[in-house]
Image: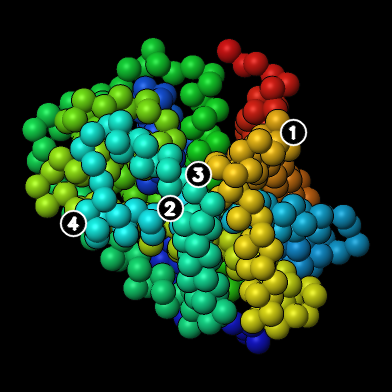
């Protein structure tokens, strides 16, 4: 029996919505530059191992919590562990959503500016000029804010429409388009002379490059990329019907995220090598070096437009999941209408996002704990809230919720066999808590591993 909450209408709908949340700027903007910085194929192998052996069980945990409770990220813990303080995780989730939205929407806005620049032919093949373009734009007090508002407005519009008629409907349209567009770019790039060097960088591992630092970077990236540790999957899973197999859904969406990360690598790395750019360029890789590359290609503006449109789609299907975490909390716990919940969430992000956008220019000198607003929100979410949230979620499933409840949920009330149950529980009880605690302590600088 389903309750009166909105639900995803089909298994494909859930799949594209969860994959839509996972596939985002993390795949297209962050993954390629981390691969570039941490040594290519060796980093990718470590990343894949983390996704399979650590993140997949955590993904299942969030599905269990959400689907079993049919509640928002805070209500879920109130229902599953009444009278305890575990609902505090929900507060962390809501805080993490706000923190991520505050910088994510700014980069989402940048992708719209870059689409606009592709249309007006604004990219230069001269690296000094292109660098200056990026600096002028990112430090301007007006355009980044405008585009961030447009991006936020588009995301809010989708979330207001609800789960089935908003999030699911748009994910079903946008995710297949994203797949086609990114394959289009990857194929074009693979035909560039010199591309093979980039491909071998992606596929020929040099294990001497693996260090403690790269292991931790891979683990952190896997978390962020799969939208884990902050109630996002819990919230989406709460709209999944009881008869769906959550093991299947979790596995497929994680593989989709991995697949898109590889495609993003294939679309970007060979181009970087073909034009003799350093793959370890860092966060500016996508926004500075790619326009430079596109400006040198015949019909480059078309490819640039498609590429930045892909980034925009990937970013929107993720930002809606972040807004939904807060919206579900407001509507269910504070009994506010969906429309008002989205309005309040957006109003907050208008302010915090603008502060982030301005921290590249006008507010450059304003520092909180030594960081500008953009970096502070990113650091707060990725290095503090997400690891704590993830750690608590894993402990909750491994040690608090009864084993039979976890099994019942994973098997969808006995409908499906879960042959890997023992392994999953072992990872959740012992391996995951230790691994997450290590990333957390390391990122705070309390531990220097290797
Ligand atoms: N997974 C998204 C990405 O890779 O860009 C980012 C993200 C979305 C993180 C939703 C967390 C989240 F809840």
Q: CA distance from mark 3 to mark 4?
A: 26 Å
Q: Residue at 76% x, 67% y: name it.
A: 75
For the residue pair 253 and 223, the one nearer the viewer reads as 223
Say whether mark 1 is within 8 Å of ligand 1.
no
Q: CA distance from mark 1 to mark 3?
A: 21 Å
Mark 3 vs mark 4: in front = 3
94 sits to left or right of 278:
right
Residue of label 3: 139
Residue of label 1: 369
Task: Estimate how packed mark 4 is, as few (under 14), some (14 to 19) or many (20 or more) residues with alpha carbons within 10 Å.
Answer: some
Residue 101 falls in which quadrant of the image?
Answer: bottom right
For residue 302, which numbered disc appears in the image? 4
- Label 3, secondary structure: give it: helix
Q: Residue 190: tell me if it is visible.
A: no
Q: Residue 294: tell me if it is visible.
A: yes
Q: How many marks?
A: 4
For the residue pair 44 and 289, the one nearer the viewer reads as 289
The colour scheme used to paint the residues is: rainbow
| Residue 270 in the image, given as x and y percentages of width and height | 21, 34
Q: CA distance from mark 4 to mark 1?
A: 42 Å
Residue of label 2: 110
| Residue 304 in the image, given as x and y percentages of width and height | 24, 51
Q: CA distance from mark 2 to mark 1?
A: 26 Å
Q: CA distance from mark 3 to mark 2?
A: 12 Å
Task: Estimate how packed mark 2 is, as few (under 14), some (14 to 19) or many (20 or more) residues with alpha carbons within 10 Å.
Answer: many
The relative height of residue 373 versus residue 406 in the rendered view (above or below) is above
| Residue 154 in the image, given as x and y percentages of width and height | 48, 71
* Circle 3/circle 4 CB separation < 8 Å: no
Mark earlier in primary sequence (3, 4): 3
């Amino acid at each position: 029996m389903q309750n009166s909450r909105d639900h995803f209408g089909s298994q494909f709908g859930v799949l594209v919505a969860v994959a839509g949340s996972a596939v985002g700027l993390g795949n297209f903007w962050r993954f390629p530059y981390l691969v570039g910085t941490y040594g290519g194929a060796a980093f990718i192998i470590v990343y894949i191992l983390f996704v399979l052996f650590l993140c997949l069980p955590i993904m299942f945990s969030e599905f269990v919590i959400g689907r079993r409770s049919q509640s928002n990220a805070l209500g879920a813990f109130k229902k599953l562990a009444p009278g305890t303080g575990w609902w505090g995780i929900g507060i962390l989730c809501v805080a993490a959503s706000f923190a991520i939205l505050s910088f994510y929407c700014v980069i989402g806005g940048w992708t719209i500016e870059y689409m606009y620049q592709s249309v007006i032919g604004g990219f230069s093949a001269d690296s000094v000029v292109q660098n200056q373009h990026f600096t002028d734009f990112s430090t301007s007090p007006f355009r980044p804010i405008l585009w961030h508002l447009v991006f936020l407005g588009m995301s809010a519009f989708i979330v207001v429409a609800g789960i089935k008629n908003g999030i699911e409907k748009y994910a079903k349209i946008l995710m297949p388009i994203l797949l086609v567009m990114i394959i289009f770019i990857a194929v074009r790039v693979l035909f560039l002379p010199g591309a093979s060097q980039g491909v071998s960088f992606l596929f020929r591992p040099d294990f001497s490059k693996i260090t403690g630092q790269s292991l931790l970077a891979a683990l952190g990236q896997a978390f962020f990329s799969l939208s884990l540790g902050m109630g996002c999957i819990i919230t989406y899973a709460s709209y999944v019907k009881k008869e769906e197999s959550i093991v299947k859904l979790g596995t497929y969406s994680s593989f989709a995220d991995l697949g898109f990360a590889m495609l993003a690598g294939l679309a970007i790395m060979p181009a970087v090598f073909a034009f003799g750019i350093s793959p370890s360029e860092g966060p500016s890789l996508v926004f500075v070096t790619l326009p430079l590359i596109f400006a040198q290609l015949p019909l480059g503006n078309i490819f640039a437009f498609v590429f930045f449109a892909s980034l925009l789609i990937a970013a929107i299907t993720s930002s809606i999941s972040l807004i939904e975490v807060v919206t579900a909390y407001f509507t269910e716990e504070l009994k506010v209408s969906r429309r008002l919940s989205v309005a309040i969430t957006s109003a907050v992000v208008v302010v915090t996002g603008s502060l982030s956008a301005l921290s590249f220019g006008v507010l450059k000198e304003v520092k909180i704990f030594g960081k500008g607003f953009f970096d502070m929100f990113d650091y707060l979410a990725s290095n503090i809230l997400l690891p704590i949230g993830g750690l608590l979620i894993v402990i909750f499933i491994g040690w608090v919720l009864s084993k039979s409840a976890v099994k019942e949920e994973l098997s969808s009330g006995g409908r499906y066999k879960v042959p890997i149950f023992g392994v999953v529980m072992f990872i959740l009880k012992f391996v995951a808590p230790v691994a997450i605690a290590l990333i957390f302590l390391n990122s705070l600088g309390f531990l220097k591993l290797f």
